[in-house]
Amino acid sequence: MASGCEVASEEQIKYANRILKAVKYIYPEENVIGEAIEKPDSTASYATLLEKAERLLRFGEKTGDYQARFLLGLVHFEKHHYAEALTAFNSIKDQDPRALYQLGVMHFDGLGTPADLTLAVEYMNRVAQSDSPQAGQIKHAALYNIGQAHMEGYGVPASSVEAERYWLEAAADGSPNASVKAQTALGMFYSKPETLDLTKAFSWHFEACGNGSLESQGALGIMYLHGQGIRKDMESGLYCLRGAAERGNVYAQGHLVALYYHRKIFSKAVALAKRISEYNDIQAIARETGCVAEFVTKGIAIALFYYARCLQTGHGVKQDETRAETFFSKAVELDTEVCKELQLDIAMGKL
């Protein structure tokens, strides 16, 4: 019989245990916390782990311990109790740059407070300029966010020059301890027509991929396949593309469908495209993978178009022109420009 308790995901359990480890660091005498970390109960609910941490943190908060208050704010934030999180972070924002950073995030996204992009950028700037040892790696994250704000014109005038400047500082020459998001952002930045420099784009994606970026791993695969910014290398391209696709990069999955099709491995193209055709929550996929929603959408559109083409021609699947039209239409709804290019390939006999 089911217990009725929500089963925590692996990531949630990891998050809760990180909170518990932080609590143990502050309160090493609390054996119950130590035991929870050393002998983690995989069946323990996420809520139970956080409640255990919260009880100790509330005690610490009463004694004026600002570290306890910061961690308690994180617990509230993770539980989506944004008003309580905002209160906790606000109370220590002048003592702890980590709290200031969290406030910046909350003001950017309007969590527990109306969105205030100007104030969010101000807070991120204060974090980036902080000399506090606690600023640590979040300085790079703050710099990345400031760059993103300049790129989008959020709270500051839009400026690709300023975005590049902040991202370069955040990326710190490709250091694994810097902002990997900034490294990937620079790879994307130098791939745009108005700021095109494919050698730089490849270099930054290479650094970011080495530091764990799923998005850059997919980008590298495509750049290797087409010889963009690097000598064409089909083996390396396929290796990167498969690796990224297996880790959930939908843009890589879409390009892998295309690669299978052009290599006439139609059964694989159809199987993967059919699976991708069932994706329906683009924003959730973007959050889970850390990939930009725009490229998740493009990946699905590519897969749907190739699936439609297979249905139209009978390659790897029983011919069904009615279903083909359905999937062609779905692909166009997702990304008209991608479909225009692929339609041109059909007209030229390339697809």
Image: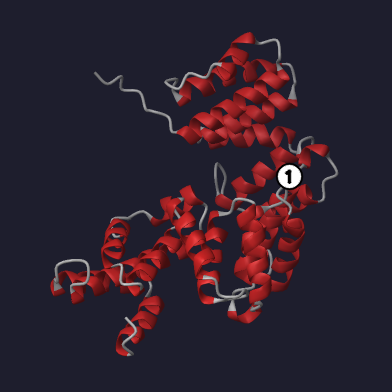
Q: Residue at x 60, y 50 (%)?
A: 212
Amino acid at pointer 1: Gln
Q: For the image shown, how many numbered marks are present on the structure?
A: 1
Judging depth in this view, the residue of 338 and 124 nearest the camera is 338
The x, y position of residue 110, in whole percent, is 55, 49
Position of 323 with respect to 169 (left or right) is: left
Question: Residue at point 77% right, 42% down?
Answer: 136
Where residue 309 appears, as percent x and y from the top left, is 25, 74
> Residue at point 65% right, 42% down?
102
How far across and down, in percent of the image, does residue 201 sit?
64, 70
Q: Position of residue 316 (x, y in %)?
A: 22, 67
Task: Report the side of 252 relative to 119 (left or right).
Answer: left
> Is residue 6 something one can see in this rendering?
yes
Look at mark 1 in the image and give the residue it sits on: 137
- Nearest the camera: 134 or 227? 227
In the rendered structure, the answer to whether residue 319 lies left or right of residue 297 reads left
Tell me if residue 99 comes above or below residue 51 in the rendering.
Answer: below
Quarter holding the C terminus is bottom left
* Residue 118 in sight: no
- Residue furthest to the bottom: 348
Residue 72 lies, with reference to residue 38, above or below; the image says: below
The quadrant of the picture occupied by the N terminus is top left
Secondary structure at numbered mark 1: loop
